[in-house]
Structure formats: structure tokens, C-alpha cells
Image (spheres, rainbow, N blue to C red):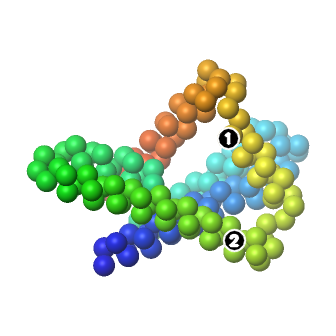
Amino acid sequence: SGIVHWVILALMGGIFIGFGALLSVNLSKGTSELLGEGVANLLTGIGFITGFFMVIHTRSGLFTEVNVLLPIHLLASKDKLIQNVVRTTIVWIITWLGNLCGALLLSACFLGGNVVGEDDKARLAVIVGKKLQAAGGHGGGWGGPLPPGERGNNLGGRAAGFAPLA
């Protein structure tokens, strides 16, 4: 059925993005000290792009893509508005939960298989620490990380959504 298919696509999206995130950790660990923070950031981006490419190539479900495409569809469809709102909400929920469960499943497999070492965990702590840092940068406070994150999610969602049209 359509829902089962979408659940599988959302799980795959979470697995692929999680794989890209873990690859970015692996590629960038130890490079800050050797080659500088800029090279470490570049390698982090290359790892993440790999996971994002896998999402686009397989047409998996990604929450950021859904956040761009569904509102456009919802606002463009004048008839059956209530039905479309309900369907849109269901797709949002399935995609978000599928991405989360896919990423958690991948993480459990990697941790259970001892694929993630202590140096990976240390680099991951640095990356997550930067992402969770609320102060500094773009105005400080909770608004600090939001503008660049929103732009990144918006562009990523558009790229994933419109890639099949190319």
C-alpha cells in the first residue's frame, strides 16, 4: 500500500542521512589538528553530501524535502482542502518518524557492531556540540542557529524535491 511504501522510503531516508553523518565524522576526525578546521569542515560536508546523494538517487523520503513540497501542493490545491491537510499531516508524521527510526536503527547497528570507535565518538561530540551551541554567531540565544539551519534545510529540501524533475 501507499503508506507502507512511504514508511520504507522514510526509513531509508533516515538510514542514508545517518550514514552520511557518520561518514562525515569518519572523514573529518583528526583533520582539525593536522590540516585545520576548514579542511575538517570540508570533509564533514563531503561525508554528509554522500548520504544526501543516496537519498536523492533512491528517491527516499526526507523530512526537509517534505517540508518544501507539501506546503506548495497544499496551497496550490483549492479543492478538498481538509482532506489534503489531513493527508499532508500524515505524510509529515510518517516521514519524520521514519527518518528518526531509520537513523536510530543505523546507529544501533553501528554501535552494536563496534563500528564506531572512541575517536569517532569524540569527533561526533565536537560536531554535535557546535550544532547545539545556542549562543554566539547569528544574534545569539535560540535564534542563533536557526537562520543558517533554516536556509540549509530549505535548500536541501528543494534539491531533493526537484532532483527527479531534472
Quarter-of-image position of residue 91? bottom left
Front one among 59 and 86 = 86
**Residue 42 place in picture, x, y as percent:** 69, 44
* Residue drawn 67% across the image and 32% down it: 134
Q: Which residue is mark 2?
A: 108
Horizontal relation, residue 144 to residue 69: left or right? right
Amino acid residing under circle 2: Ala
Whether residue 40 is visible to the viewer of this picture, yes or no, is no
Quarter-of-image position of residue 1? bottom left
Horizontal relation, residue 132 to residue 123: left or right? left
Horizontal relation, residue 39 to residue 166: left or right? right
Sooner in the amino-acid sequence: mark 2 or mark 1: 2
**Residue 147 place in picture, x, y as percent:** 53, 30
Q: Give the answer, above or below, for where 59 lies relative to 80.
A: below
Front one among 162 and 84 = 84
Amino acid residing under circle 1: Lys
* Residue drawn 64% across the image and 48% down it: 45
Density class for disc 2 (Cα within 10 Å; few <14, some 14-19, many ≥20) is few
* Image mark for residue 163: none
Q: Which residue is mark 1?
A: 131
* Residue drawn 81% across the image and 59% down it: 120
**Residue 15 place in picture, x, y as percent:** 57, 67
